[in-house]
Amino acid sequence: PELIDDDGDGDGDDGDLFLLPGTEIIESILTEPFVELTICVLVLLSSLLVAIGTVPTLPLFAATADQFALDAIGYIFALEFALRWYATGQLTVSYLARPLSLIDGLVVILPLVIGKVAIPLLKTAAVASAGTSGDTGLAVQIYNLIPPWLLTESGLVNLLLLRILRLQRILEDVDTFAKFSVALGIQPTEVRPYQLAIARVVLSIFTLLSV
């Protein structure tokens, strides 16, 4: 681990911070305009795939491909979230309490945990438990604690559509927005505060229309 002289005394005592290895490299990669642009494209693609997946007449092969692509994007987002947390250098719980981290937890981690882990396992355990000990099984009780709307397809669809909120990361401030603009071929000096305000309004409207 890398030692950071946090207290400025140069003695390497307990007041200094130890950062995890490779954090600076990971952070520099994640803040690259091309990476930020790729994530934004995946966010928009995710919303499109969710909308396509709701078409009732979608052929089976298309529905399977659509779900596969959605799952792949979800895992990419989860990996990005983990890398951003690691890049903080200490994996502190305070990072998870940040607004953007809470958004990631809601629209990235929660759908994966519920859709790919919790619901399949709990359904299997609930059926097995109900078959042996009635409705008093622990698995059944845990299963009943999950909000009903999360157990429906529409519930998970709404969570997935809220991934559009991840675009808030590039709209955090003018400097962040300017760095993203580089990937679009716009010089940072050409970015103005009113452009950021317009982008925020457009994102808010798009979010409301999505859900």
Image: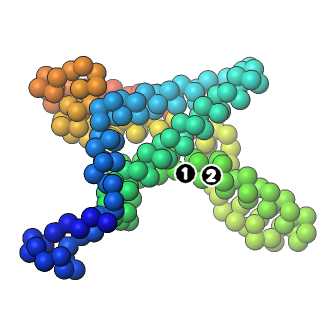
Q: Residues within 10 Å of mark 1 (few under 14, many from 20)?
A: some
Q: Would residue 14 be found to the left or right of residue 81 on screen?
A: left
User: Are discs 2 and 1 less than 8 Å apart at CB?
Assistant: yes
User: Can residue 207 be seen in this snapshot?
Assistant: no
In-image side of 10 versus 34 (left or right)? left
Q: Under tag 1, what secondary structure? A: helix
Amino acid, disc 2: Ile
- Of residues 79 and 108, the one nearer the viewer is 79
Q: Quadrant of the N terminus?
A: bottom left
Residue 151 shown left or right of residue 191 in the figure: right
Residue at the disc numbered 1: 110
Q: Secondary structure at mark 2?
A: helix
The residue at 29%/36% (across/down) is: 32
- Amino acid type, callout 1: Leu
| C-alpha distance separating marks 2 and 1 | 6 Å
In terms of depth relative to the viewer, which is nearer, 162 or 4? Answer: 4
Measuring 13% from the left and 22% from the top, which residue is drawn there?
190
Q: Which residue is mark 2?
A: 114
- For residue 171, which numbered disc appears in the image? none
Spot occupied by residue 15 in the image (x, y as percentages of width and height): 19, 77
Coordinates of residue 114 in the picture (x, y in percent): 62, 52
Residue at image point 88% right, 68% down? 134
Of all residues shown, which one is farthest toward the bottom?
14
Dot 2: within a 10 Å radius of its alpha carbon, few (fewer than 14), some, or many (20 or more) residues? some
Image quadrant in which you'd find residue 16: bottom left
* Residue 97 location (% of width, % of height): 36, 59
